[in-house]
Amino acid sequence: MSQLSQITLDAAQAARPKLGNPAVVGLAGFGMTTLLLQLHNVGLAGIGPVVYVGLIFGGLAQMVAGLQEQKCGNNFGYTAFTSYGCFWISLCGILLGNKYDVFKTSPTDLGWFLVAWTLFSSILWVGSLRISKAMFACFTTLMIGFVLLDLAHFGFPELTFYAGLDLIVCALLAWYMMAHLVLADLFGRDVLPVGKPIL
């Protein structure tokens, strides 16, 4: 590449506006909706806020964040945010369907729904080993929570409470990673470290 071409390329890149990181919205939506559902699961809140936030923030906003990750070339973020956005929209659809007697879902049906998502999440859990310790911790608590909820829907309902406690930690870890990205951008340094990848 000639010196003139390099100067032109550098100027074009400098003129390009700075773009936000879509992961901050994806992590925020995932954390918020997960937290609200677990507050319901441990008996502190009703289901109403879960449905509305699940459709808009955990569902729609997280899907949009995932689609933006695709443009950044981030397959992990693309897969995770888009898929979990679909998870929340689907779960809210199940809750609304049960409420209004449309395609009603039994506890066992919901259990198999959760088992499928547990298997899917195990793939991303392996991928999280290559990202950071915080991401690995988030996905580990997610996997534990899914397994407990699976068991809760197949004869051990008392485990729902413990899944709720575990997944509250998962939600807060997602927010920690969101804060890591936001504060690193604002302060120009790593304010909240997330740890090096395990693998």
Image: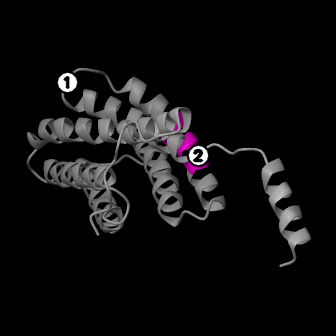
Helix, strand or loop: magenta stretch: helix
- Residue tagged 1: 43
Snapshot colouring = one colour
Residue in the picture at 31% in, 52% down: 195
The kind of residue on which mark 2 rests is Asn
Q: Secondary structure at mark 1?
A: loop
Query: Does the magenta portion include 197?
Result: no
| Quadrant of res 39 | top left
Q: Quadrant of the C terminus?
A: bottom left
Packing grade of label 1 (10 A; few <14, some 14-19, many >=20) is few
The kind of residue on which mark 1 rests is Gly
Please state the horizontal and vertical placement of residue 130, each as a whole percent of the image.
Answer: 35, 66
Query: For this rendering, which residue is in front, 144 or 95?
Result: 144
Please state the horizontal and vertical placement of residue 29, each as a whole percent of the image.
Answer: 47, 38
Residue in the picture at 83% in, 48% down: 15
Q: Which residues are magenta?
A: 55-65
Q: Is residue 135 left or right of residue 12?
A: left
Query: For this rendering, which residue is in front, 192 or 21?
Result: 192
Res 101 visible: no
Q: Is residue 96 left or right of residue 44?
A: right
Name the outermost residue toward the bottom.
1
In the picture, the disc for residue 144 is none
Residue in the picture at 85% in, 56% down: 12
Query: For this rendering, which residue is in front, 5 or 176?
Result: 5
Please state the horizontal and vertical placement of residue 52, each as a whole percent of the image.
Answer: 48, 29
Q: Secondary structure at mark 2?
A: loop
Q: Is residue 101 above or below residue 195?
A: above
